[in-house]
Amino acid sequence: MIPKNLLVELFVEELPPKALKKLGDEFARLLAAGLKAQGLATDASVVTPFASPRRLAAHVTAVAPQAADKAVSQKLMPVSVGLTAAGEATPALLKKLASVGADASAVATLKRQMDGKAEALFLDSMVTGATLIEGLQKALDEALAKLPIPKVMQYQLADGWTSVNFVRPAHGLVALHGDTVVPVTALGLTAGRATHGHRFEATTDPIELRDADRYAAPLAEQGAVIASFDARRAEIARQLQAAAARQGLTPIDDAALLDEVTALVERPNVLVCKFEQEFLAVPQECLILTMKANQKYFPLLDAAGKLTNQFLIVSNIRPVDPSRVIEGNERVVRPRLADAKFFFDQDRKKSLESRVAGLGKVVYHGKLGTQGERTERVRVIAKAIGAQLGGAELAALADRAALLAKTDLVTDMVGEFPELQGTMGGYYARHGGEPEAVAIAIEDHYRPRFAGDALPRNDAGLAVALADKLETLVGLFGIGQLPTGDKDPFALRRHALGVIRMLVERDLPLRLDDLVATAARAMGPLLTDAAAPAQLLDFVYDRLAGSLREQGYSAQEVDAVLSLRPARLADVSARLAAVRAFAALPEAASLAAANKRVGNILKKVDGTVAARVDAALLHEPAEAALNDALALATPRADAAFERGDYAASLQALAALRTPVDAFFDGVMVNADDAALRANRLGLLATLHAAMNRVADLSKLAT
């Protein structure tokens, strides 16, 4: 049985563009996985997905016409149930054999094997391999059932009675194994070799496919369709760059838009269009957004990154004279740009400050009040942060920016385009004569919005952004709205990571616990859960730990540093580097083990052990030597710690290895004499405190 290549295609009505790429990839993956599971394809088989607006297809190499027969061993029942004391088959065994297609003659061939603690009977047999028709039918049914369809559509077949559920109505099914049709069925269709090309520009319809390997080429030549999603995307990108280069411009870089347009066209044709220069008076973010979101156009930028009045469209047809297509798209975009200009002009008739009162009518959260009330809380937090970062002047700028930061929510432009909140606030602040620092802070106060996003550009922006995220975190934790599992409707994980990034990457001299406490005070009586601040701190440190592990730090290193809960997150990277350097020292393993031992000893003591030593009670030479070594090493370690040289601080402790080892070899900590015992515990508490300022070194012990 010679393997041949397999092609399966579903021809459907226009598929949802945002889901097309995933649908195409999953259809091919699931189909191939089903074939492999039945032994019809192997891991060496190459799977190629195809997806266009009206088709999902998969090409799988080296698919066998029938799977190889397979030896199987089937457990029947325990020996005690299947055989009598004389070794004869019981009625239960005979009934079981009949159910699997065997008779009493098979009793003699049964094997006895231990199954857990009891001996069981097993039947060895050969299972005939699945034929391609059977296997492909099963694989196709399973693939269609498991497709990640965003919204299922129900439609009737031609008989007028039968209903089918699928993403869109299907009108054709192709299944070719080499040049042979595999007569499988799906969605009320029976497979053949005919497919269809472009609605308007195909030169042949239907297109008869000769074999599984002649698919993309006939569709392109006779059907005017680029069947491969990736090939079509690359062609659109090439045409966009070429058309822009002819104008001396650059198309906007937007991978999501490129994906969506790729899912909308079968025969891409990029054309250059224009709009009136007067619209460029509107902020370019507004124009770019309306062209991308509403029209799926690609705005063109000049060398300085500024928007021009030219844009690119991706047409699905290639007329000899494209002027009508260009004129139509220019006509369609004009009202959209006019709306944006109208919103911008109307919004500028009112100052941002005059809109503050309107925030009192916008509900923020049922338990946390309005955006107006929230603004007052953010102001309190932002002022406190501003005062810490830059004194009264920065506090005043942060307060002003916090007062105006949310006012663009009640403008017409943001009402139409919520994605522009913050951005429009900056434009309107400048128009109203606000200081540039305030305008920038308003623009930036949502940053960072996502992983990799830029941080606020100035200190006022940092103060307001921190305040905004902290108010959200403390407020929602305070009313019990914590993330659960993969559900995080208020994006609190993203807010926490934003706080972490600002504190760490800008090396801010702010304590996390102080920031949370400031936000908690600003919430006032709305903070109904007194445990919320502590829960929030746990949550932030958990997010920080995950982020650090993703950056390549080991779980041991992260645990050693974060178990001490360093309040200044900007120090964490330096502490981690110091721990890594310390771990490479020859003394590290011994000291880490000793530190763990000391910690365990101190945990077993009732009450708190004071880190205090009476030199007169140091009777053993080893305990006196350890005390002397601590007296020398601790000041050096502490001095390095205070100046932020954490590596030097830990390295100063390396001198303690020998006296620590000698202490545990020669000194009985739990002496009968209570005074001696208390003094030795005090010495260990002193050692423990000295060793664990930078990190909990016991976490490095293996």
Image (cartoon, rainbow, N blue to C red):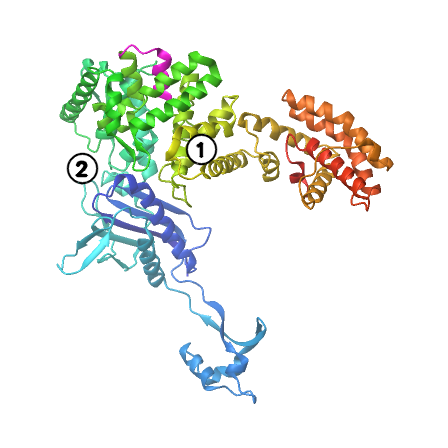
The relative height of residue 418 versus residue 93 in the rendered view (above or below) is above
Considering the whole magenta stretch, tell me its main secondary structure: helix
Please say whether residue 254 is visible from this viewpoint.
Answer: yes
Q: In front: mark 1 or mark 2? A: 1
Residue 120, by quadrant, is: bottom right
In-image side of 434 versus 327 (left or right): right
Residue bearing the label numbered 1: 496
How far across and how far down the image is residue 520, in percent? 43, 31
Please say whether residue 177 is visible from this viewpoint.
Answer: no
The relative height of residue 264 versus residue 502 in the rendered view (above or below) is below
Q: Which mark is residue 376?
A: none
Q: Secondary structure at mark 1?
A: helix
Q: Residue furthest bottom?
A: 86
In-image side of 150 versus 112 (left or right): left
How far across and how far down the image is residue 606, in percent? 68, 45
In-image side of 521 versus 412 (left or right): right
- Magenta segment includes 412: no
The relative height of residue 671 versus residue 420 in the rendered view (above or below) is below
Q: Amino acid at mark 2?
A: Glu
Q: Residues within 10 Å of mark 2 (few under 14, many from 20)?
A: some
Disc with the residue nearer the chain's start (1 vs 2): 2
State the quadrant of the N terminus.
bottom left
Residue bearing the label numbered 2: 201
- Identity of the residue drawn at 61% across and 39% down: 556
Q: Which residues are magenta?
A: 432-446
- Magenta segment includes 437: yes
The mark total stands at 2
